[in-house]
Image: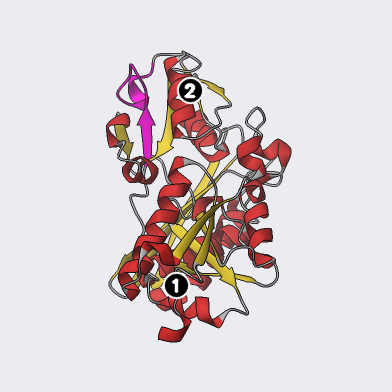
Amino acid sequence: MSDDLPTPARPLKIGTRGSPLALWQAHETRRSLMAAFALPEAAFEIVVIKVTGDQIQDKALREIGGKGLFTREIEEALLDASIDIAVHSMKDMPTIQPKGLILDCYLPRADVRDAFVSPRYASIADLPQGATVGSSSLRRRAQLALRRPDLQLVEFRGNVQTRMRKLDEGVAHATFLAMAGLTRLGMTQVARSAIAPEEMLPAVAQGAIGIERRLDDPRTAALLSAIHDRATGLRLAAERSFLLTLDGSCETPIAGLAILDGDQLWLRGEILRPDGSASVAGERRGPVSNGTAIGKALAEDLLNRAEPGFFG
């Protein structure tokens, strides 16, 4: 293996988006590989790639192409070998990878909860009648509309810093961010409260970082196997199977969370009407080794219980 390790003369190229959070995730991947193989920082090169989803900020994702907008250019660079690995926020990832690529390495998962963020109010319950809440997430908007149909919901895109500026400018009274992202950026003080999954089930794979590689690259596969977190992989196998069976996209409000309890896995899931007028929720438990089947079975159960035309 030592002959295959990256060196300053032949660094491993790590592809990433350019946002502060994406860069933190790329740096964390580099730190993990440095620690696993006692390598210097110069043995890695972080390559920032502009993606369509970051360049178009004035439209909802569902209007311009969905989740692939945060991955397409990075995956093209991976396929043409401009980079060796790609680091992604897993909640942004489509459930099927392009031919020739694979996702089989995950870093340890962080806090899965949503954060309630507001300059004036401490929680969703504290928001006054008719308050304006900004979010680009169809899931969060649908969950909020289900619980508080009186609220006004507006489109809210951009990185953490952009959304905080919009709040300061009075565009909305509150918004939601992922606790994992705030923790990684050292900004947990921004959260007025963390929302328990029992109140608001998070997005599938929220809080998880995935590292994508080429299928025909055994050198990189061996490197990544040393930093893969098995527990996160088992949880995401169930959650992403659930999402795949539902054909989840940015146009479909879906929430899901898998928890490990010894050799057992507990998966909760929810599907919602886009306008928040109805939801169908359920759960499944079973052996950890059956995670993919558990995800599929829960998705099929929710689909069977949903009324025709549920997704609008």
User: What is the distance, in whole Å, between disc 2 and disc 1 at their CAs?
Assistant: 48 Å
Residue lying at 33% horizontally and 16% vertically, measured from the top left: 120
| Figure quadrant of the C terminus | top right
Answer whether residue 21 is magenta in the image: no
Amino acid type, callout 1: Thr
Q: Which mark is residue 7?
A: 1
Q: Which mark is residue 187?
A: none
Q: Position of residue 25 (x, y in %)?
A: 42, 53
> Which range of residues does the magenta coloring cover?
114-127
Judge left or right: residue 84 versus residue 233.
right
Amino acid type, callout 2: Val
Q: Nearer the viewer, residue 294 or 36?
A: 36
Answer with the quarter of the image where residue 61 lies: top right
Residue lying at 32% horizontally and 30% vertically, measured from the top left: 190
Q: Nearer the viewer, residue 195 or 90?
A: 90
Q: Is residue 174 visible?
A: yes
Q: Nearer the viewer, residue 33 or 178?
A: 33
Rendered position, 68 above or below 158: below
